[in-house]
C-alpha cells in the first residue's frame, strides 16, 4: 500500500463530497462515488479531516468486487476508509455489490447537494441555484476550508451569506459586513493583488453582485479598479478622488475648467477603463478614503500610511493636479506647502506691523491632519514658538529701566521668550523655515542683549543689597520668607534644581499639572515671584546662600551643616528629626538611577518636618558638550518624579527653586582670562571690564574684596571648551531664579494666607482670540454692529476653504450674536430668577458652583464674544488648570438642561463656547 500522501491528489469536488459524508456519518466506509474520468493515479491515500482515506478508481464491476473483498479482509481498526470511484451508478451494479456500499448505492456528486451537506443548511435560496448554476457552489466548495470556522449560515443559504463566504474564502475579506471604508482598508494589504488575480473567472464576472447592495453608487468604480490590475492601489486612487472629483473644486473655481476636464478624462482612461461614471459614484470613494486615513493617523504610525499618501501624490501629479494636492489638508505635500507659506508670512510679520496673515498661516498648519503626529509634531511646535516670538516683538518689549523692573519683566515675559527662543535656535528640517528662524533668532537675541546691557548697568544695586520689591526675594532670604512660614503649617520640601533658569521652569511648571500638582501663592502676592541670585551666579555662592539662609560660600557639607543649624528651621523641626539636605551623592541607589529607598522613606514620612533635596540634572546637562535639546519635565529630570511622589505621600508642600539660572551657548565667544576665573566671572585684578562686562561690588558679591567682573552679555565665556550652557555671569537669565510653591491636589490641606493660582501666561503666548461672526437671524433685538472686515488673505489661505471641503474639514462653530449687540442690560442677572435655572440648581445639589461665580463666567464669555480659550478662562477667573474641567462640568450641569449643548467644551482645541441664543430661549430671558 502506498504511503500516506499529504498533498491533495483528489479533485476538490471529491474531497468536499467526502467532507460532507464524514460530517454526516463519521463511521462511513466503502463509499462509492460516481466519477466519469480516471485519476492520474489509480490509487491514492489522502487525509480528509481526521480520517485516512484510500481512494481507488475502478474501471469495471469486477475491479469493484476485488477492491471490496481485499478491503474487508483487513483488520477493521487499522485499515483506511475505502472510497470507490467509477462511472457506474446503482442501475449498473449487482445487488451483492450494492449491499456492501455505504448507503447501498454509489453517490452522485452534486456541488449544491455537497455544499448543503457540508455547511449543514436545510435549504438553499433558489435565486442562487437558478441564476448562478454550478459555479457559485463550486466557488463555495473550493474555499470551504478558509471560511467554515468563521461564518454560521443558519437554516438557509442566502445570497448575502454566500457572497460573504466567497469573500472570506477567495479574497480573505474578514469583516462581518461590507462597507466602503472596510473595503479600502482591506485593499491596503500587500497580498490583495494576488488574491484578486487568482479569482475564478466566474467570480470576477459577478463581483458587482457582492459589491452593489452595500455600495450602491460606487460598486462599478470599485470593481473596475479591482479587476483592472489596480487592486493594490485602490486606496490611493480613492484618496485622489477626494481632490479630483470634489464639488468644491468646481464651485470655487480652484482649477481651470479645461484642465480639470482633461485631468478627469485621463483618470477615467487610466483607472476606470474609460468608463464615464457620475460624480456620485466617485465622491463616496474620496470621502471613505479620507475618513480611513484620518482614523489611521489617530491610531497608527506614519510608516503605515505614508506609502498611501505618497502614491496619492504621484497619481495627482501624473494628472497635472500638483497644485491642488499641495492644498490638501491630508497629504504630506499639503503640510509642506503650508509650512512654506507660514515661513513667507512669518518673515513678513517679523518686519511689519500686521501679523494676521502669519497667524492664519499657522492655523492652517495646525488644522492639517498630519500636524499632530510625531514626525511633524516638533516642526509644528517650533512654528508656534516662532509665532509667539513675533507677537512678543510686536508688543515692543522694554529695553531700559531699573534692575527691579527688568527682573520683573523677565519673570512675566522673558522666561517664556527664552523658552521659545531655545526651541527655534537649532532651526528646522524645512529649509525655508530654517532660514526665517535664523533671522528671527538674531532679532530676538539682539533685543535680549539690549535688555541685559540695561540690566548690567543697574547691577550695582543688586551687589550692594539695596531693597527690592516684594516680588523679588534675595536668595539668602528664601528660608525665612518662603520655606519657614510654610513649614510652620505643613511638612515642607525645598526642591533645588541646580542651574534651572526661568525658561526651564516655565516648561516644568506646565508639566506639573499633568501630575496633579497645584501651584499656590501668598494671598498678599498678585503675580509670580522669584529669587535673586548672589554674585557671581555660581553654585558655591548662590546655593550655599540659599540653604544657609545667609550670604555664604561653601560646598555640600557646608550646606548640610548650615541648613540643619538654621535657627528658625530648628525651632520648627524636632531635635530628633532635624532639617536635612540630600545632595546628588545621597539620592541615587547604587547600581541604578532610582531614588534610594532610605531617602524615599524619609521624604515620604512625616517625622522630618523640613527637608531639602538638590537635583543636578539641569546643571549636569549644561556642563556637557551635548548638542541635544532637552524637553524639561517630570520624565526628563532624573529622580524628580520619584522625589515628588514621595513628597505627595507625606502631604508635603513643595517649594521648587534653583540656585542660579544659566545662558545657553548661542554662538558664544571665548575671552581668555589671565587670573582667577569661572565660566562667566573673573577677578577684578585682571583689569578693567570690557564693553561686554560690568564690575560689581558690595556685600552680596561673594568674591575676594567683595568685587568681581561679570559679563552682562550672554555671548561671552571664559572657558576654552564649549559646553551646552554656562552660569556665573550677570545676565537676566542667570540672576533671576525661578520660584514656585506646589501642593498635590490629592492631599486635602488648607494653608492660612495661601491660595491656589492658575498658571500665568503672557498674552502673546496665547493665540489671539477671533470674535465670532454675527448671525442676523439669531439676534433678538437691536441693531447688529457690523463685524470689521477681515484682512486680506494669502493665496494659500484663500484656496484652503476649497480643500477643507474636499477633505472633510469640521464645520465651523455656529455663529453667535455679537456681545456688542444692544440686548437688554440686565438679562444676565434676570436669568438667575428663571424657574428653569432654579430647578437645575436644585438638581445639581451641593456640587453646583455659586451664583456669583456663574455670573462672572457668563460675563467673561460675553466680553469674549461668547467664546473663550481655556488658558484665558484660567487666567481671568484665577482657576488652576487642574480645576478647570471640574469647574466647567459643574456649570454644564446647570446650563445644559436635558442634555442640550448650551455650553460646549472642545477638549482638542481647548475652546469653550456658549450658544447665547439657545441659552436665552431655554431660560426665558
Image (cartoon, helix red, strand yellow):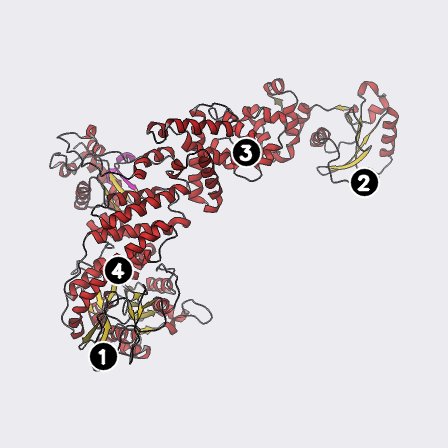
- Where in the figure is residue 916, as x and y percent of width and height? 21, 35
Q: What residue is disc 2 on? A: 78
Q: Are marks 2 and 4 in contact (CB under 8 Å)?
A: no
Depth check: 311 or 54 in front?
Answer: 311
Q: Nearer the observer, disc 2 or disc 4?
A: 4
Q: CA distance from mark 2 to mark 3?
A: 50 Å
Task: For residue 154, say whether it is visible.
Answer: no
Q: What residue is disc 4 on? A: 445
Q: Nearer the observer, disc 3 or disc 1?
A: 1
Residue 687 bears which disc, if any? 1
Q: CA distance from mark 3 to mark 1?
A: 80 Å
Crowding at mark 3 (Cα within 10 Å: few <14, some 14-19, many 20+)? many
Crowding at mark 2 (Cα within 10 Å: few <14, some 14-19, many 20+)? few
Q: What residue is disc 3 on? A: 231
| Corner quadrant of residue 595 | bottom left
- Where in the figure is residue 849, as x and y percent of width and height? 22, 46
The residue at 37%/38% (across/down) is: 327
Of pointers 2 and 1, the one earlier in the residue sequence: 2
Q: Are marks 3 and 1 in contact (CB under 8 Å)?
A: no
Magenta-drawn segment:
894-905
Crowding at mark 1 (Cα within 10 Å: few <14, some 14-19, many 20+)? few
- Where in the figure is residue 909, as x and y percent of width and height? 31, 44
Q: CA distance from mark 2 to mark 1?
A: 109 Å
Amino acid at each position: 500500500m502506498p504511503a500516506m500522501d499529504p498533498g491533495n491528489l483528489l479533485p476538490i469536488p471529491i474531497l468536499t463530497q467526502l467532507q460532507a459524508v464524514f460530517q454526516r456519518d463519521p463511521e462511513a466506509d466503502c463509499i462509492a462515488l460516481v466519477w466519469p474520468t480516471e485519476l492520474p493515479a489509480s490509487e491514492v491515500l489522502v487525509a480528509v479531516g481526521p480520517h485516512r482515506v484510500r481512494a481507488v478508481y475502478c474501471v469495471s464491476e469486477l475491479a469493484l468486487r476485488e477492491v471490496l473483498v481485499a478491503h474487508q479482509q483487513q483488520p477493521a481498526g487499522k485499515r483506511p476508509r475505502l472510497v470507490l470511484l467509477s462511472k457506474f451508478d446503482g442501475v449498473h451494479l449487482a445487488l451483492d455489490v450494492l449491499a456492501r456500499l455505504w448507503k447501498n448505492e454509489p453517490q452522485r456528486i452534486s456541488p449544491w447537494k455537497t455544499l448543503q451537506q457540508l455547511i449543514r443548511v436545510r435549504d438553499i435560496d433558489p435565486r442562487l441555484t437558478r441564476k448562478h448554476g454550478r459555479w457559485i457552489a463550486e466557488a463555495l466548495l473550493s474555499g470551504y476550508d478558509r471560511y467554515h470556522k468563521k461564518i454560521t449560515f443558519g437554516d438557509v443559504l442566502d445570497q448575502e451569506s454566500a457572497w460573504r463566504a466567497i469573500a472570506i474564502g477567495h479574497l480573505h475579506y474578514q469583516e462581518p459586513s461590507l462597507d466602503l471604508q472596510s473595503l479600502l482598508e482591506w485593499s491596503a494589504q500587500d497580498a490583495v493583488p494576488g488574491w484578486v488575480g487568482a479569482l475564478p473567472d466566474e467570480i470576477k464576472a459577478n463581483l458587482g453582485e457582492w459589491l452593489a447592495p452595500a455600495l450602491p453608487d460606487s460598486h462599478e468604480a470599485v470593481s473596475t479598479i479591482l479587476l483592472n490590475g489596480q487592486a493594490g492601489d485602490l486606496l490611493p486612487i480613492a484618496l485622489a478622488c477626494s481632490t479630483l472629483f470634489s464639488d468644491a473644486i468646481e464651485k470655487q473655481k480652484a482649477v481651470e475648467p479645461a484642465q480639470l476636464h482633461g485631468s478627469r478624462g485621463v483618470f477615467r482612461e487610466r483607472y476606470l477603463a474609460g468608463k464615464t461614471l457620475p460624480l456620485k459614484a466617485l465622491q463616496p470613494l474620496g470621502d471613505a478614503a479620507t475618513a480611513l486615513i484620518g482614523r489611521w493617523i489617530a491610531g497608527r504610525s506614519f510608516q503605515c500610511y505614508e506609502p498611501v499618501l505618497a502614491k496619492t501624490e504621484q497619481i495627482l501629479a501624473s494628472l497635472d493636479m500638483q497644485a491642488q494636492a499641495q492644498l490638501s489638508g491630508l497629504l504630506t505635500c499639503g503640510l509642506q506647502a503650508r509650512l512654506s507659506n507660514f515661513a513667507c508670512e512669518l518673515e513678513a510679520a517679523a518686519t511689519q506691523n500686521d501679523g494676521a496673515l502669519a497667524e492664519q498661516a499657522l492655523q492652517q498648519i495646525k488644522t492639517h491632519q498630519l500636524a499632530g503626529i510625531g514626525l511633524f509634531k516638533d516642526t509644528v511646535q517650533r512654528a508656534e514658538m516662532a509665532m509667539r516670538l513675533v507677537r512678543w516683538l510686536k508688543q515692543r518689549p522694554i529695553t531700559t529701566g531699573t534692575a527691579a523692573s527688568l527682573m520683573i519683566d523677565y519673570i512675566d515675559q522673558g522666561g517664556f521668550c527664552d523658552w521659545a527662543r531655545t526651541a527655534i535656535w537649532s532651526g528646522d528640517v524645512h529649509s525655508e523655515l530654517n532660514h526665517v528662524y535664523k533671522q528671527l533668532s538674531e532679532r530676538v537675541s539682539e533685543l535680549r542683549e539690549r535688555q541685559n546691557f540695561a540690566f548690567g548697568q543697574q547691577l550695582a544695586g543688586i551687589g550692594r543689597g539695596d531693597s527690592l520689591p516684594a516680588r523679588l526675594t534675595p536668595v539668602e532670604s528664601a528660608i525665612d520668607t518662603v520655606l519657614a512660614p510654610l513649614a510652620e503649617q505643613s511638612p515642607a520640601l525645598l526642591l533645588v534644581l541646580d542651574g534651572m533658569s526661568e525658561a526651564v521652569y516655565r516648561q516644568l511648571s506646565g508639566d506639573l499639572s499633568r501630575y496633579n500638582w497645584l501651584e499656590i501663592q501668598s494671598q498678599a502676592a498678585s503675580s509670580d515671584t522669584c529669587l535673586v541670585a548672589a554674585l557671581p551666579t555660581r553654585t558655591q555662592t548662590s546655593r550655599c546662600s540659599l540653604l544657609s539662609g545667609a550670604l555664604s560660600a561653601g560646598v555640600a557639607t557646608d550646606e548640610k551643616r548650615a541648613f540643619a543649624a538654621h535657627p528658625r528651621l530648628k525651632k520648627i523641626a524636632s531635635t530628633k528629626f532635624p532639617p536635612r539636605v540630600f545632595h546628588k551623592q545621597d539620592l541615587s541607589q547604587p547600581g541604578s538611577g532610582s531614588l534610594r529607598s532610605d531617602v524615599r522613606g524619609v521624604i515620604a514620612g512625616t517625622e522630618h518636618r523640613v527637608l531639602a533635596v538638590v537635583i543636578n540634572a539641569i546643571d549636569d546637562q549644561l556642563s556637557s558638550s551635548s548638542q541635544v535639546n532637552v524637553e524639561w519635565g517630570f520624565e526628563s529630570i532624573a529622580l524628580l518624579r520619584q522625589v515628588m511622589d514621595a513628597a505627595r505621600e507625606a502631604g508635603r508642600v513643595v517649594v521648587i527653586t534653583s540656585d542660579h539660572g544659566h545662558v545657553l551657548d548661542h554662538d558664544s565667544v571665548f575671552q581668555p582670562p589671565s587670573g582667577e576665573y569661572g565660566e562667566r566671572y573673573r577677578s577684578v585684578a585682571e583689569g578693567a571690564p570690557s564693553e561686554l562686562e560690568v564690575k560689581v561690588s558690595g556685600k552680596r558679591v561673594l568674591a575676594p574684596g567683595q568685587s568681581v567682573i561679570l559679563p552682562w552679555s550672554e555671548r561671552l565665556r571664559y572657558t576654552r571648551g564649549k559646553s551646552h550652557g554656562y552660569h556665573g555671569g550677570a545676565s537676566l537669565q542667570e540672576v533671576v531664579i525661578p520660584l514656585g510653591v506646589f501642593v498635590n491636589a490629592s492631599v486635602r490641606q488648607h494653608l492660612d494666607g495661601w491660595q491656589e493660582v492658575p498658571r500665568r501666561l503672557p498674552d502673546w503666548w496665547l493665540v489671539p482670540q477671533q470674535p465670532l461672526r454675527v448671525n442676523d437671524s439669531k439676534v433678538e433685538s437691536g441693531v447688529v454692529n457690523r463685524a470689521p472686515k477681515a484682512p486680506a488673505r494669502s493665496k494659500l489661505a484663500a484656496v484652503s476653504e476649497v480643500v477643507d471641503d474636499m477633505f472633510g474639514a469640521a464645520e465651523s462653530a455656529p455663529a453667535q450674536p455679537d456681545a456688542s449687540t444692544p440686548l437688554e442690560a440686565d438679562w444676565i442677572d434676570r436669568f438667575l430668577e428663571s424657574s428653569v435655572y432654579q430647578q437645575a440648581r436644585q438638581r445639581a445639589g451641593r456640587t453646583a458652583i455659586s451664583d456669583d461665580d456663574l455670573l462672572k463666567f457668563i460675563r467673561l464669555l460675553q466680553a469674549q464674544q461668547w467664546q473663550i480659550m481655556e488658558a484665558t478662562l484660567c487666567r481671568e477667573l484665577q482657576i488652576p488648570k487642574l480645576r478647570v474641567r471640574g469647574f466647567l462640568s459643574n456649570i454644564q450641569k446647570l446650563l445644559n438642561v436635558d442634555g442640550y449643548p448650551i455650553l460646549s467644551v472642545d477638549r482638542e482645541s481647548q475652546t469653550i463656547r456658549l450658544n447665547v441664543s439657545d441659552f436665552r430661549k431655554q431660560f426665558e430671558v
